[in-house]
Amino acid sequence: MSAMSPSSSTTPLSSLSIRPNALAAPSSGIVEVFDYGRNKPGLMPLWVGEGDLPTPAFIAEAASRSLAAGETFYTYQAGIPPLREAIAGYLSGMYAQPISSDRIYVTSGGMHALQIAVTLTAGAGDDVLIPSPAWPNFIGALSVSGATPREVAMRFGNRGWHLDVEDIAHAVTPRTRALIINSPANPTGWTATHDELRAMLDIARKHGLWIIADEIYGRFYFDGPRAPSFRDVMNADDKVIFVQTMSKNWAMTGWRIGWLEAPEALGQTIVNLIQYSSSGTALFTQRAAEAAIAGGESFIVEQVERARRNRDVLLDAFAKEPRFRIAEPQGAFYLFFGVEGVTDTRKLAFHLIDEANVGLAPGTAFGAGGEGYLRLCYLRKTEDIEEAARRLVRAVGAL
């Protein structure tokens, strides 16, 4: 046995000749808080972006049948044809327009779809614009690719969270290659209007930019059956790539299955990128996804109504404590809020674990635009949200 095991090595990281792109991958500010409080008895865990319901049984049973049938071999890189057709049919019905299955590519989760979209559009020396605060994985994916994320600050005021599209236009430089637009947004709940989507498309067209559209919370929208989408306003030849996942609508976060929707001309390139990143998505998870799309509509409706109810519980409860700075989210299932007089919300997140036994994500995890805020995921049973609200109101009132 050697005197020093690999795990106890004290070799400086800088001497290991690791590529700068890998070193640029940021640590997660959410995981830091998660690790601090994960085993605390009675803690209310509202820090990560998932609900408390397990995947519906009929979805898991489809995967079990696939495994029992021996479907454990390599499969199509782009995804099995029945699933691609099911996704295309689901989207065609949702957006009232024909969407070809040739535009659909199954991925190993939404993060995999995002990584492929970034690889297609930007790399070393390129800039990509992101409204901030933003899901931290956008910045992570760009940093790993060698591209430079450029945050465009959103604004918080009487209208809640707001993106001034002119700020996007002013941020474009000759190095800009793409915009990442997440609507409805994690963490703010901001949802772009059709006019805002048109304006962003105009900017992209003017400068020859790609739009990477993350609309995974499109069903979690509180003013209609779905949120406004780039699909409502785009032309067939617009440079838009959609990243999607099964995680949110169908409570399948741990399954790691999603899809990319892109122009058919990119088909072989995307298949190649899948080959060299995952070699395809496990067939039994694709069977589960088929079942989810075929039979999961009532579950989605139930989830959205649950989110709406819990949002309203929080807004009513927090309105009773004047130190909360809150705005009504239009979509997704997060409340992104501040506390008057508190700027260090990373420190506050740890304090709330200790004093309120509630786990929240610090706003600093969501980029520079998130400083001074906290994110609360409210896709849980209403009794839990009511209790969390009581604890948080007491803790903030005692600050």
Image (spheres, rainbow, N blue to C red):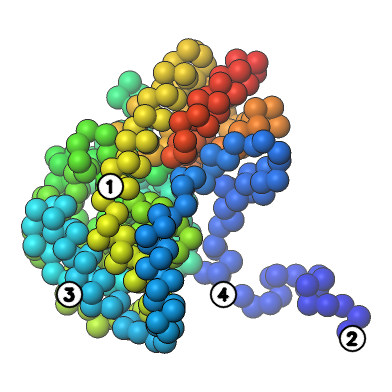
Give the label, 2 or 1, closer to the camera: 1
Q: Which residue is mark 3?
A: 102
Q: Which mark is residue 1?
A: 2
For the point 15% across and 41% down, which residue is it?
A: 194
Question: Where residue 44 sits in the image (x, y, percent)?
Answer: 59, 36
Identify residue type, mark 3.
Asp
For this view, does 15 lie left or right of residue 202?
A: right
**Helix, strand or loop under label 4:** loop
Where is residue 334 drawn, in percent x and y? 42, 37
Crowdedness near tag 4: few (<14), some (14–19) or many (≥20) residues, C-alpha within 10 Å: few
Spatial CA distance of label 4 from label 3 is 36 Å
* Circle nearer the N terminus (4, 3): 4
Quadrant where the C terminus is found in the figure:
top right
Q: Residues within 10 Å of mark 2 (few under 14, many from 20)?
A: few
**Under tag 3, what secondary structure?**
helix
- Label 4 or label 3, whichever lies nearer to me, is 3
Vertical relation: 311 (above or below) 90:
above
Residue 138 visible from this viewpoint: no
The percent position of residue 204, horizontal first and vertical second, equals 19, 55
Task: Give the residue at x 63% y 21%.
Answer: 395
Q: Residue at x 31, y 83 (%)?
A: 76
Q: Which mark is residue 67?
A: none
Q: Which residue is mark 1?
A: 298
Looking at the image, residue 396 lies above or below residue 154: above
Q: Residue at coordinates 23% horizontally, 74% vertically from top-left?
A: 82
Q: Which mark is residue 19?
A: 4
**How far apart in space, not on screen, are marks 1 and 3 (Cα)?**
27 Å
Residue type at numbered disc 1: Ser
Left or right: 355 as drawn, with respect to 187:
right
